[in-house]
Amino acid sequence: MYAIVETGGKQYRVESGATIQVERLPGDIGATVELDKVRLVHGEAGVQIGQPLIAGAKVTAEIVRQGRTRSITVFKKKRRKNYRRTRGHRQGFTRLLITNIATA
């Protein structure tokens, strides 16, 4: 059984027992998170496709880690104008362990 869920403006294919890394979600390590924006569920009963979401479906996950990704360099330049800007960015993330996929 798997599902397509949306969080942080992105869609993820999740299965029970899988670990995914998503945009940062509030909560402490060990806390439970419910993802209720479920777009598709594929299970024993076949495929359920939401229009755009499946009413009553939810995915339960446990927060395994909160962290930040590797640093990237953002460099801006305008030629012949002596304009240069260098910045770094580290995106926050949450690593989730999918525990349950429930349909209505």
Image (cartoon, rainbow, N blue to C red):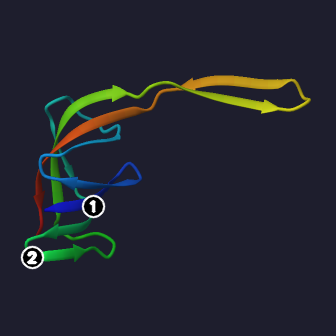
In the image, residue 6 above or below residue 52 = above
Asked whether, in this view, residue 104 is left or right of residue 93, the answer is left
Task: Farthest residue to the right: give it.
Answer: 80
Query: Residue at the spot x=72%, y=24% of the render?
Result: 85
Q: Position of residue 80 (x, y in %)?
A: 92, 29
Say which residue label 1 marks: 4
Say which residue label 2 marks: 45
Q: Position of residue 29 (x, y in %)?
A: 18, 29
Q: Quadrant of the N terminus?
A: bottom left
State how many labels appear: 2
In the image, residue 22 above or below residue 90 = below
Query: Residue at the spot x=25%, y=68% of the render?
Result: 40
In the image, residue 70 above or below residue 45 = above
Question: SS at mark 1?
Answer: strand
In the image, residue 100 above or below residue 78 = below
Q: Amino acid at mark 1?
A: Ile
Q: Quadrant of the C terminus?
A: bottom left
Q: Amino acid at mark 2?
A: Ala
Depth check: give the residue in front, 63 or 16: 16
**For residue 84, what is the image quadrant?**
top right
User: Within 10 Å of the Cα at label 2, are there few (<14), some (14-19), or many (20+) other Cα atoms?
Assistant: few
User: Within 10 Å of the Cα at label 1, are there few (<14), some (14-19), or many (20+) other Cα atoms?
Assistant: some
Q: Position of residue 44 (x, y in %)?
A: 7, 72
Q: Which mark is residue 22?
A: none
Question: SS at mark 2?
Answer: loop
Comes first in the chain, label 2 or label 1: 1
Q: Position of residue 27 (x, y in %)?
A: 23, 34
Asked whether, in this view, residue 98 is left or right of residue 21, the answer is left
**For residue 48, what is the image quadrant?**
bottom left
Asked whether, in this view, residue 34 is left or right of residue 93, the answer is left
